[in-house]
């Protein structure tokens, strides 16, 4: 918790009174006591900061003085400002969900009477988007231009293990078990722990990087902040750098490599149940999103099934 409160997110929050700071610290302390992951607490601070910065100056001062001053009109203003800045509907909805839970906490504590986030009024419609894997040709082109051992390992961890960006950032050497050829992911999204497996090319990259960076806690320590790891922003910057070097015109985020991992495994015949565990999904419904993408597996299974059916119904085709 101490490290969270000293983070750059906390320092940038435009809070104007001891009251608002106490409200937020109390809520974060509650979440911490309930074993919420540090990344979840950081995400809350980001959401609060995003909300405040999208209010007019007078309302920012009022809400920053006491979060109980937040009204439904403030939420309306936040949405309009965020949309004008081209924030995605999903980002806005995630922010609203974080705010709603925080305001529920204040109401239960008797500090707030009305919930300012009203679902029917403030929830934005978000089209159901398919995951965006990278085509294999773009993946090959991308890795051709990565000449850094560290950076190649960063992206291999997403492509071979399906790790999220935050999971890669926070990996420690104690999470890696070379003997069992596994990596343990703790306190992941949704509080799901899991074990992922180390492919041969990934092991080679891991051992090569270990000879250069085994004395640090994190696999990928920050070069700017002592005792810290690389950040999501750092990995996004690296991805954009290598996309430019590879002359890949389409934009891909690092997370697209995780989508590629899932799609490639499904195309290779891995079951949805196994993929769910490897991806760290809490629900099979999350994994089912990928079933619309693994076309080669669907076609193969269709052809095999139809061959068996046709043998049983061999006379239906006529002469």
Image (cartoon, rainbow, N blue to C red):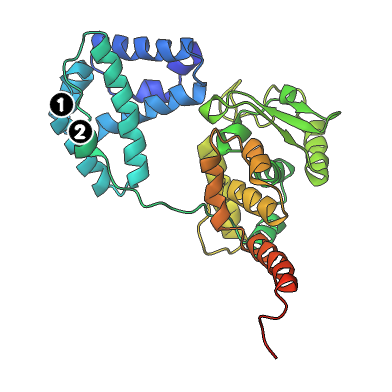
- Label 2 SS: helix
Report whether 16 appears left or right of 269.
left
Residue 170: image quadrant is: top right
- Can residue 258 be seen in the rendering of this structure? yes
Give the image location of residue 241, x and y in percent: 57, 52
Report whether 239 appears left or right of 107.
right
Specify the label residue 75 is tagged with.
2
- Label 1 SS: loop
Residue 11: image quadrant is: top left
How packed mark 2 is, by other alpha carbons closer than 10 Å (few <14, some 14-19, many 20 or more), is: many
Residue extending farthest to the bottom is 319
Give the image location of residue 107, x and y in percent: 23, 14
The residue labelled by disc 1 is 71
Give the image location of residue 104, x and y in percent: 28, 19
Specify the label residue 177 is tagged with.
none
Q: Residue at x 71, y 42 (%)?
A: 153
How packed mark 1 is, by other alpha carbons closer than 10 Å (few <14, some 14-19, many 20 or more), is: some
Between 33 and 69, the one nearer to me in the picture: 33
Query: In the figure, 176 relative to 122: above or below?
Result: above
Q: Residue at x 63, y 53 (%)?
A: 263
Report whether 50 appears left or right of 303.
left
Q: Residue at x 82, y 33 (%)?
A: 181
Residue extending farthest to the right is 179
Report whether 93 appears left or right of 279.
left
Query: In the figure, 102 relative to 318: above or below?
Result: above
**Labels 2 & 1 near each other (Cβ < 8 A):** yes
């Amino acid at each position: 918790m101490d490290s969270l409160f000293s983070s750059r997110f906390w320092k940038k929050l435009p809070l104007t009174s001891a009251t608002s700071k106490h409200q937020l610290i109390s809520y974060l302390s509650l979440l911490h006591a309930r074993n919420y992951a540090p990344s979840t607490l950081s995400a809350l601070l980001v959401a609060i900061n995003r909300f405040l910065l999208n209010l007019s100056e007078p309302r920012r001062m009022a809400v920053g003085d006491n979060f109980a001053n937040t009204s439904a009109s403030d939420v309306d203003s936040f949405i309009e400002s965020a949309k004008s800045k081209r924030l995605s509907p999903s980002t806005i909805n995630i922010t609203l969900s974080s705010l709603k839970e925080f305001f529920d906490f204040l109401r239960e504590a008797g500090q707030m009477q009305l919930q300012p986030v009203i679902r029917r009024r403030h929830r934005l419609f978000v089209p159901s988007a398919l995951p965006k894997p990278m085509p294999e040709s773009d993946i090959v082109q991308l890795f051709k231009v990565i000449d850094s051992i560290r950076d190649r390992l960063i992206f291999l961890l997403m492509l071979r293990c399906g790790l999220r960006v935050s999971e890669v950032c926070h990996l420690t050497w104690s999470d890696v078990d070379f003997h069992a050829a596994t990596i343990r992911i703790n306190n992941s999204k949704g509080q799901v722990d899991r074990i992922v497996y180390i492919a041969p090319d990934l092991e080679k990259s891991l051992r090569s990087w270990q000879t250069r960076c085994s004395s640090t806690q994190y696999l990928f320590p920050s070069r700017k902040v002592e005792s810290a790891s690389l950040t999501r922003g750092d990995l996004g910057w690296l991805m954009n750098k290598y996309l430019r070097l590879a002359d890949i015109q389409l934009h891909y985020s690092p997370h697209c490599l995780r989508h590629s991992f899932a799609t490639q495994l499904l195309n290779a015949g891995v079951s949805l149940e196994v993929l769910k565990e490897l991806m760290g999904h809490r629900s099979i419904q999350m994994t089912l999103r990928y079933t619309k993408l693994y076309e080669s597996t669907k076609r193969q299974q269709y052809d095999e099934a139809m061959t068996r059916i046709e043998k049983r119904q061999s006379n239906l085709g006529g002469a």
